[in-house]
Amino acid sequence: RAKADGRNALRCFAPEMNETARERLELEGWLRRALELGEFELHYQPQVTRSGTPVAVEALVRWRHPSLGLVPPAKFIPAAEESGLIVAIGEWVLAEACRQAAAWYRLGQPIRVAVNVSALQFSRPDFFQTVEQALSGAGLDPSLLEVELTESLVMHDPGESARQMEQLRALGVRVAVDDFGTGYSSLSYLHRLPIDVLKIDRSFVAELEAPRGTQALVQAIVALARALDLMVVAEGVETDAQLAFLNELGCDLVQGYLFARPMPTREVSAFLTMHGTSSTEISL
Ligand code: C2E
Ligand code: MG
Ligand code: MG
Ligand code: MG
């Protein structure tokens, strides 16, 4: 029975489907229970330097469904956002990511953790407290946490975003703009926003080898980041050719299947043991 229920629920996770109100309620119930039952887990994908040293890992949430297996975020984040459950899920993600980063630190593998934050979560008046609590609860140095906000979230209300980013940075937390290039950044805002990192969306990285001017675009983003004194991370790096382009363009960090897929904790620990961590990149 659980299996059949799961199938039905999963059917309406597909964002392109027109869910009925009843289906949405059902799904919301499944997500709520998943949270209570501890069925969410975090996988982590390394961000590495030119020389291949990991300096950060991005936390990516998955739902370990008892009969359906590992459900990717694209299948449930949109529903979680619509129902508001993303706030509770996001709170768990922050706390768990901080706990894990603190554990790696204590094991002598200091690595920064990057956490995705959704618009609804970020807009909550208590978001800053949630971050503070996650850090203090884990005993994690704030400089080992990076918050990823999408470009569209940031540009939706640049003034308010800037105010909240400033608060986070005062604490020592780093701020990254995710999926950069896919939204509509106003350059006049961008230079005033308290940002540390630009993450080039993987759609651009995927097109680097195509003769379509994408190289010039990525080059422009890297130049922009340089001018604003920001770090640039390219996501979705899959091939040596893409890596060569990105290195030539001066991209600081790369993340993608070429180095590692998002991995469960144990595999990440092994990866860090094998490749080391760069403590010089991390200011404590
Ligand atoms: P994102 O933050 O842009 O994360 C990068 C996505 O690209 C991840 O997908 C990652 O697995 C995938 N990726 C990384 N390298 C490669 C590559 O070389 N090739 C390809 N084809 N893909 C690559 P994932 O884990 O499925 O997550 C998808 C999106 O779900 C994330 O995009 C993020 O927007 C959202 N998400 C994930 N975890 C969380 C979370 O804890 N909270 C919130 N609010 N959103 C999350
Ligand atoms: Mg991200
Ligand atoms: Mg991204
Ligand atoms: Mg993306």
Image (tube, rainbow, N blue to C red):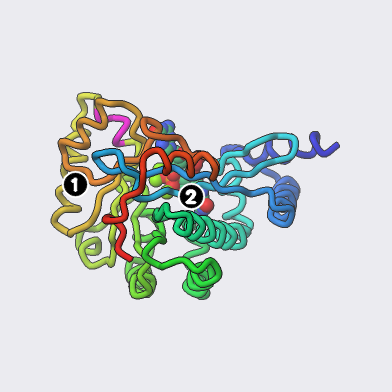
Quarter in which the N terminus is drawn: top right
Using residue 94 as the reference point, say whether residue 53 is left or right of it.
left
Mark 2 = which residue? 59
Q: Quadrant of residue 235?
A: top left
* Residue at the extreme right: 1
Q: Residue at x 39, y 61 (%)?
A: 144
x and y percent of residue 146 in the render?
A: 39, 59
**Mark 2 element type:** strand
Seen at 73% across and 49% down, the residue is 30
Q: Is mark 2 within 8 Å of ligand 1?
A: yes
Q: Is residue 258 above or below residue 231?
A: above
- In the rendered structure, which segment of residues is drawn in magenta? 204-208
* Residue under pointer 1: 222
- Magenta span: predominant SS is helix
Magenta stretch contains residue 256: no
State the residue at coordinates (63%, 58%): 85
Q: Position of residue 198 (x, y in %)?
A: 29, 52
* Residue 128 horizontal/vertical position (percent): 47, 73
